[in-house]
Amino acid sequence: MVSTSDSIFDPSSLSVGAYNLTYTVTTSAGCTDSAIAVSLVHPDPTSSWNFSEALCENDLPITLRGGAPNNGYYFGPGVTDSTFNPGTLGVGNDTLYYTSG
């Protein structure tokens, strides 16, 4: 059971597992009633992507691939959907990202 007086359930402070959340109401006459719900705390997702390629600003757009797990999202400067267009950027280093969460 998780106890909180401010009505905020913060799963980041808990381990993975099932937790009973109890909501109790007390009237001014002293009558009480409760309801219980089970909340499941899942592990944080992990993602990975290895991309280290030198590109020129006049190279054609490339489709970004290889992020794990599948069905993630690529983003960063010059990225639209899963396509990176080096022609939209100037010379220099840019950081691209992949997230699966």
Image (cartoon, rainbow, N blue to C red):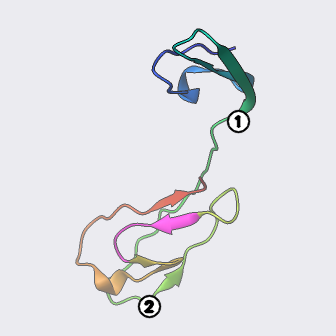
* Residue 38 % position (x, y): 76, 29
Q: Quadrant of residue 54?
A: bottom left
- Sort mark 2 into few (<14), some (14-19) or many (20+) by Cα contacts within 10 Å: few
**In what element is the residue under mark 2?**
loop
Q: Which residue is mark 2?
A: 60
Mark number displayed over residue 42: 1
Q: Is residue 56 magenta?
A: no
- Sort mark 1 into few (<14), some (14-19) or many (20+) by Cα contacts within 10 Å: few
Q: Is residue 37 left or right of residue 87?
A: right
| Viewport quadrant of the N terminus | top right
Q: Is residue 17 above or below residue 58?
A: above
In the image, what residue type sits under mark 2?
Leu
* Residue 6 % position (x, y): 45, 20
Q: Between residues 47 and 6, which one lies in front from this camera angle?
A: 6
Give the farthest residue toward the front.
29
Residue at 71% x, 26% y is 16
Q: Which stretch is magenta?
A: 73-78
Q: Between residues 45 and 88, which one lies in front from this camera angle?
A: 45
Q: Is residue 34 above or below residue 99?
A: above
Dot 1 or dot 2, earlier in sequence: 1
Q: Between residues 28 and 93, which one lies in front from this camera angle?
A: 28
In the image, what residue type sits under mark 1?
His
Give the farthest residue toward the top.
30
What count of labels does the image hold?
2
